[in-house]
Image (cartoon, coloured by chain):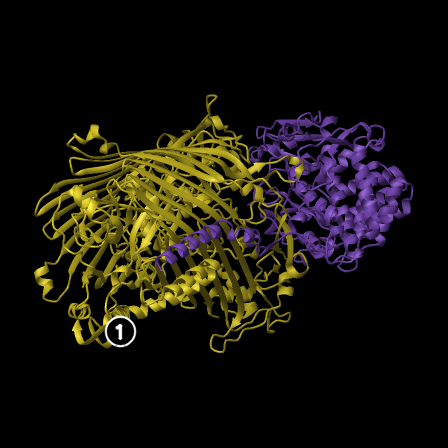
Amino acid sequence: MFFETLCNPPFHVHRRERDCFTKTLLVMRLTLILLLAGCLQLSARTVAQTVTYSARSVALTEVFAAVKKQTGYVFFYNKRDLEGTVPVTVSLRKAGLEDALKAILAGQPLGYLIRGNTIVITRPQPSVAPVSSAASSAISPPVEIHGRVIDQSGKPLAGVTVSVKGGKAMAVTDDNGLFTIRSVEPDATLVFTSINMERMELKVNGRVELTVALQSRTAKLGEVSVEVNTGYQSLPRERTAGSFSKPDMTVFNNRTGTVNILQRLDGLIPGLTVNNAPGADQFLIRGLTSVNGQRSPLYVVDGLIISDITSINPNDVADITVLKDATAASIWGSQASNGVIVINTKKGAYNNKLSVTYDGSASFQGKPDLAYYHQLNSAQFIAAATQIFDPVQNPYAVINSPAGGLLSNVGSPSLPPHEQILYNKYNGVITADQASAQLAALAGQSNLQQMKDLFYRDAFLANHTLSVRGGGPRYSGYASFSYTDTRNNTPSNNNNSYKLDIRQDFSLSPHIKAYLITDLTNRVLSSNNAASPTSQFLPYAMFRDANGNNIDMSWLYLSPTLQSTYTGKSGVDLSYSPLNDAGHTQNKTNELIARINGGITINLYKGLRYEGVYGIVKDEGKTTNYLDAGAYAVRSELVSFTVASATPGGAPTYYLPSTGGRLTTKNTDIQNYTIRNQLVYDAGWKGGLHQLTVLAGQEALDQLSKSNQSVVRGYNPQLLTYGSVNYTALGAGLLNPVKPNYTTNESVLLNDAYAGTEVENRQYSYYANGGYTYDAKYTLNGSWRIDHSSLFGIDHSAQNRPIVSGGLSWAIGKEKFLTDVSWLDQLVIRSTYGVTGNSPVSGTAASFDVLSAMTTTVFPNGTGLSISAPANKHLSWESTKTYNEGVDFKVFGRLSGSVDLYFKNTDNLIGLLPTNSFSGYTSITGNIGKMTNHGIEVSLNSVNISGRNFSWRTLLNFSYNRNRITSLTYQLPLTTGDILVAQSYVQGYAAYSVFAYRYAGLDSLGDPQVYQAKGGKTKTPYATLPADIKNMGSAQPLFNGGFTNVFTYRRFSLSANMVYSLGNVMRRDVNTFYTGGRMVPSAGSFTGNTNAEFADRWQAAGDEAKTNVPSYVGSTSLNTSRRETAYYTQAGINVVSASYIKMRDLTLSYALPPSLLNKYKIGNITLNAQLSNVMIWKANKYGIDPEFQYDQAFGSGGVRTLPVGQHALSLSAHVNF
Amino acid sequence: MYQNNIIIKKTLAVAAILLLCCGMESCTKSYLDITPKGKLIAQNVSDYDLLFDNQSLISSGSNSQVAMSDDVLQLDPYYSGAVLKTQRLFQWAAVIYDPGQDATEMTTVMTQLYVYNKIINEVMDAANGTMQQKQALYAEALANRAWCYFTLINYYGKPYDSTTAKTDLCYPIITTADVANSSFQRATVQQCYDLIINDLTTAIPSLLVNAAVRARMTRSAAEALLGKVYVYMGRYTAALTELNAAVADLPTTFSVALYDLNVTMATGGTWGYNPVTNPTSYQSLYPTAWTNTENIFCKQVTANNWNSTSSDLLLTPQAASLFTSTDQRRKFFTSQPYGGGTYIVPGALRRNSGTTLQEGIRLADLYLLKAECEARTGDLTDGTNDLVTLRNKRMSAMEAAVTITDKDSLTRMIINEREREFALQGERWFDMRRLYSDPLYTGLTYTHNYYKSDGTVVTYTLTPERLVMQFPQKVIDQNPGMSNNP
């Protein structure tokens, strides 16, 4: 057959095609040209639906060309049919298409059909008198049949196999649903098969033109057909055995409280654990598969890997598929061990009229609860600070000497007002009565309200997205513009994001299709160094006086005595108020991210096609931090590099510019590109009995990230000038400065003028993937991939490790013996096995000693080299073998779901592998252990009530994951209990295990004791053995998921989405202040207060019966030698359940009635009101929100962070024109 | 037309398959062959030169010798706060490390040895440099390797005894840099000394007299080290030659001189000594290793918190009593715990100066070794002169004067001076080893006292086999068949 595209002479098309294959780059360039042409095509297409044309005696093909040019309609004919036609003479003026065709074809032996944007030219067969079928087959010659296949709604169906029953002839419909099949006996029966559609047989009965409407298979089941996308291909769910999950997009779209796609998935994907606790792995699929490597899933957007998922606007997301088992994910090879999240963005549809959508949301998130930290109040604080005050241990002179500050932190000691009063009393400057009166005044004031008013605002998040989509016969497009305004709790903090996302699809010819995604994001952030004090700060310290003036708080950095000394010597004012200081600082970030993806598909021959995907991500950011001359940090640094005059009253010498500010400029530049070429063979035969898809391809990936930073001092933002700094001299050390920052008599300035980094990784891969389905019941999948990577110096032989997987699925529900079971609508059993990988981090394995530059003040020129990784040739990927068993079912027409059971064995865990101690290194990066994960995932979707006005739908996601480290080589042997308590990964236990001492109460001195396995108790430091330690469980949830109920009544809809996280533990926050004699902030920080539990500590003999909180022991050395306070802070009694159930969102929607909207030609308007993050139940009695609790360093217990975004109220609207 | 189409399509399909299969295979290797920035593989002479400019090479690795020296005591309540390793070292226990633990005596030095072996084996083939530059770097690596070995054998080998040195087991001789190597045999004490002497004598002629900084090995430093090696072997005459050469070859590119503590440690002097505030705290008076003019070649190691917030190891009253009234070195100590208070042992002192031990090639050590060699070889005049040169910078001139006419007494006096100069710095442990069989100190016993709060005293006595440390069990496990020290 012949299918003429008319606008492009066939010869040229093919030459271009051949060029495409010779050079990849050329394809990209060509694609662009073709895409541009396509755009113009669209504009031509929309101009005229009428024909104006006059000609005398021209060939019919020429007239077709003219009509095509004017209308965009494609002519479809058999060249043979045009034989014997006569030249045309015609005169048309603004004629309608049908009229024009009639005029053109007048007098010709031809007819026409208009199908979509195609005009089919037909040659009606001469009518034959009915004869017997035996005779007719002998008399009637085989004919050629043209036809079109559509679905119930009239949309063309592509890829439908048309075959002659009992014969050999076969055809596949194109994108317009058209097919031509030759040599068909007039009495033959045609069979139409497609994976998504019901099989259909049709007697030809002598017809040569057919239009056939097929029934959707899934439609019969009352469901939408599910396509799963692996990033490399899109497949009907039925044709793969892999384990895939897709979120409920309604809940996803309604979660307007966050613009982070992953956060919106919480509770919607069985097997995806979202753990928001600080320090936890936030997103894990099916448990942990790496101890030291990459742990988060691979993110794929529109077929290409992306690192920064936050640049994608959730409103642009069309579809999300989570790949969980080996068959699903192994196509991604050595990067897929942690699972893959595949996101496809929206696109326009061909032959669809223009539609405009607006989505807007505003989320009001309030101020955080500053008292959440559970600290001492002012009265308790003053009482405690007075009690523990120890002027002997902490002499006033030491606090007022530069060395006093150097001891705890480079900078200076702070001397808060309450200590000043106590020292004044001790030194006899004031009387005891005066001191009590002053302290009582402090005890009576609280700064909580001031903090809330001055340092916090209501957090707010707004997103507005306006999108347009539509398409003609050859072009379709989707474009969205969005604006996101994120306002956190800190005033003066601005974070605006502007996005333009355009996807264009081009049907260049029936054989060639292309698309181009242009996604631009501009983020503009600004802030100043505003403080965020909480109740962890001294509770009495006010920021503003009664007259509204900001209070000087320079005691946060320097004792008043030191301050006046330094100011006297340097002439530089060293006063400080956090409220004033913020105004002297300015941070700005401007980031532009361009994600440009293009792709081309060329149908080569029958079911064979070529697909090319080319993507570039460019992310350029610039950040400036400017501290002007008034900023405390600038003044303080200047004083550190000032030498006082030798003669009293003389001018000091400044070694840094004494005017102007400090400007830090940082530029980051990320450039990633991917080139992928693949061939896909997709065919079905024997009436769809056999369905085969084979894909093979090659891919090149390059990831380059660069950054550089420069610092100038003495900067003048008006003149753009800066001062000069002698880094050589100041790096070697300035002796006897006014305010030493290095030793008691020396200041050192590191050369920070310039710093840069550059990391580039490349990967080159081959892959293949195949799927075969027999009779729509039995499916066999297989995949193979090999990755080569540039990971620095890695031994190439270690890379030749192919990754393979295979799977089987059996639609057992379609077997005869089950078709009679009336309540069973669908039953599929899946079984897969395969390997996925996890690459080592760049630079960890090399065939040569890898040297890294180091900055040093000791050596000339300030730089040196050190061996960052010794030659280490044998390092393998972490490989995970996954065995997955799954069942998909639907029963009673209303309950559907799937259950997956998996076993994952991860081998070759990367970590530090001990080497022979005489080799020079005690350990190198190597493969050190094994880990298993097994679990169950259940996803249920139930339509409980489905009435005309009311419906109720329930979604339940449940996942259980059990992790165990089966073998692990330790760099540090677990010889003591203390070491074990500090571990999270221990052989024989789950990852993230929490270990604790077995608390045995306080002794008669208020010292914490622990039980020992050998019997008895101890309080001696270092005395515990691993056997004395108890495993409390894991910090990662064992069970988690979501539970959603959606109620719909007429135009109202109420959706309640709960998430749960169960079976894990956390350390609660406890008092950690037990010694030292001072309750003060470290220099410049808003700390100094302590846990309210301090008031309940052991204070007198006998208290051990009432409390578990250890006594306070002033002497630091006594505290560390007599006892171990970690025996309490890390005790089992302080490990509590972290289980909770939260109402993640409760959404009320209302869709405006069409009667109202039709008047304004508005498609629909939906309004939503949503309440987010309401705690429903938590297992701990301490008021801890487990989502905001983390386990810090050894000895500190758990740490609270301020809950944000809780009880947020969001309002949103969806408008469709 | 129809037929053409088929042919063209078939051709395209074949072309596409061929392209996918082999099209870019040939360029895969070059595509992946990229050199990341910020990292490199040593190729040029300048790369090897910069490998010496590595601040971590300044660390000498272990401070175990402090706890093993006989000038320390432990007392309650601070004893139980000391980590087990400190307690075990103090008790001169055979087993210091738990099974599986690494020995700090080895780890840092072994990694440095890897760097030096790498340079020794590669620098002569490096690109872009003169033969002279290569030889200087080669010599510097050799001298540094000698330093590493001298450190290691003083932990793991018996003190040198010419009668048994050829059979006494010492440390494996490792001259390659290879983490995959797993076969090691212990060499004898003699073989180790031979390696050190050979490395140093080979290196000295090519070493620079004037290096840029004191963190780089100079000819003077190598000569001083060789002199010290000879002293440890009892070869005082040979030592004296090297020590004299070391003094003659002192570098001039940076200042090498003794500080006059009478000036620097005066109250309110250049080092900021404050008799009121400093005793209850710790004082960072002393210049850092790489700026300290008393270092010819600088090495340092952390002193844990023994010098600052803890009181794990204190100077014994006996050692403290060696300081005379004007000895400025006494001011590096305080009789008070951190934060103030008193100790249950009167006269015990906490060293509250500096958080690091400086243990490189020190000018004071050079003078004292030279004086000792002169005294031992009968040159009392030069010996006394060298001793007084140092003492004049440490105390009043009146006290500094030495009037001893007996060679053995002068030697003992010099050894006492070493105790004062290096009090609580660990140098004493190495002197204890070499003096153990010195005829000058026959019948010597070393003891440690642990004072309990109830008034009882636990005394530990050093046995001869504990002059040598055992290898940790981990090393023995990794090297089947290797015999440990008894």
Whether A1206 is drawn above or below A492: the answer is above
Colour seen for chain B: purple
Q: Label 1 marks which chain's residue? A: A
Q: Which residue matches tag 1?
A: A58
- Residue sitting at x 66%, y 33%: B182
Which residue shows up at 14% across the image and 54% down it?
A127
What is chain A's hue in the picture?
yellow
**Residue, far top:** A1015
Is B465 placed above or below A1053 here? above
A693 with respect to A699 (left or right)? left
| Res. A369 in view | yes
Residue A166's spot in the image, x, y percent? 25, 40
Closer to the camera in the image, A711 or A607: A607
Q: Quadrant of the N terminus of chain A?
A: bottom left
Q: Badge 1: few (under 14), some or many (20 or more) residues near its Cα, within 10 Å? A: some
Whether residue A1183 is visible:
no
In the image, residue B421 sits, relative to residue A507, either above or below, namely above
Q: Which residue is more in the foreground, B474 or B33? A: B33
Percent coordinates x, y for residue A713 in the rendering: 53, 69
- Going by the picture, which residue comes out furthest to the right? B378
Position of the C terminus of chain A, as image quadrant, is bottom left
- Circle 1: residue type: Val
In the displayed structure, does residue A939 sit left or right of residue A1029?
A: left
Please give the name of the residue rendered at 28% of the width and 46% of the height, measured from the top-left corner. Answer: A169
